Amino acid sequence: MSLRLALPFCAVLLLAACGGSEPEPETDAGSAAEAPAEAAATPAPAAPAAAVPSSPADVTLADLDAYERAMAAKTAEIRRATEELTQARADKNQDRELELMMYMSGQALQARTAETSGLDPARYTAVARILQNTGDKLASIQQLNSMMAESIAATEDPQMRAQAEQNAEAMRQQLGDPYAGFTPEVAEALRDRLPALIAQQQEQAGLMLRSAR
C-alpha cells in the first residue's frame, strides 16, 4: 500500500562591557584641548546585528509569540482584502480587483506581516520558515493518521489490517517528530499552539484559492 503525502508549506546577543573607573591623568592644556577632538573623531561601535535562526534550536518563545501575532494579522488582512475583492468584482472594478489580487500575492503583504511580528525582517523570515515547515510536517502526520484510520476501519482481513498499520507506522517514522530540535520549552508550547497556527495557514490558503478565479 502506498500513500503520497504533499508536505506543503531568525537571539539577539547583547554585548556589554563594564570596567572600573580610574582617576583621570593630569594633562597639560595642549593635550586637554586635543582630547575632545580626538574623541569626536572616534566612530561609535556598530550595534551587533540580530542573529538569524538556522535551526529549530534557535527559535525562542518570543519568536513563537511574534509569529503568532504576525499570522493573526495576516489572516485578518487576507479576510479584509478578500471582502474588498468580492465587492470590486460585483462593481466590475477591474483596476481595483487587479490591485487587490497583486497585493495578496505580492511582497507588500509579506512585508506588512513581518513588520507586525516586531522582529527584524531577516529573523522573521527564518522563524516563519522553520515554524511553517514544522506545521507542514504535523499537518501531514494528521492527514496520514486520518487516512489510515479510515483504511484500517474498512479492512476486515486481519493480515491486510496489520499491513496497513505497519505501512502507517513506517510513514510516521519517515516524516519524523515535528517537535524534534526545538528546546523543551518551545516544543511544549508548540504542542499546544501549533494546531491553531496550522488552521490559520489553511484558512489563508483557502481564501487565496477562492479569490483567484
Image (spheres, rainbow, N blue to C red):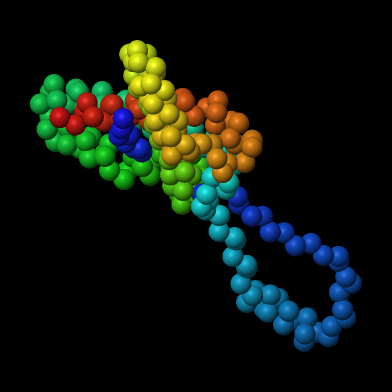
Residue 41 falls left or right of residue 112: right
The answer to whether residue 127 of the structure is visible from this angle is: yes
Question: Where 114 sits versus 209, above or below?
Answer: below
Q: Position of residue 89 (x, y in %)?
A: 14, 25
Quarter holding the N terminus is top left
Residue 160 falls left or right of residue 99: right
Q: 134 or 80: which is nearer to us?
A: 134
* Residue under the image location 23 percent in, 34 percent down: 100
The answer to whether residue 150 of the structure is visible from this angle is: no
Q: 63 or 135: which is nearer to us?
A: 135
Residue 35 falls left or right of residue 104: right
Q: 165 or 81: which is nearer to us?
A: 165
* Residue under the image location 60 percent in, 50 percent down: 11
* Residue under the image location 55 percent in, 40 percent down: 180
Tell me where residue 83 sits by quadrant.
Answer: top left
Number of numbered callouts drawn: 0
* Residue under the image location 59 percent in, 65 percent down: 46
Q: Position of residue 45 (x, y in %)?
A: 62, 67
Tell me where residue 164 sits by quadrant.
Answer: top left
Q: Position of residue 213 (x, y in %)?
A: 15, 29
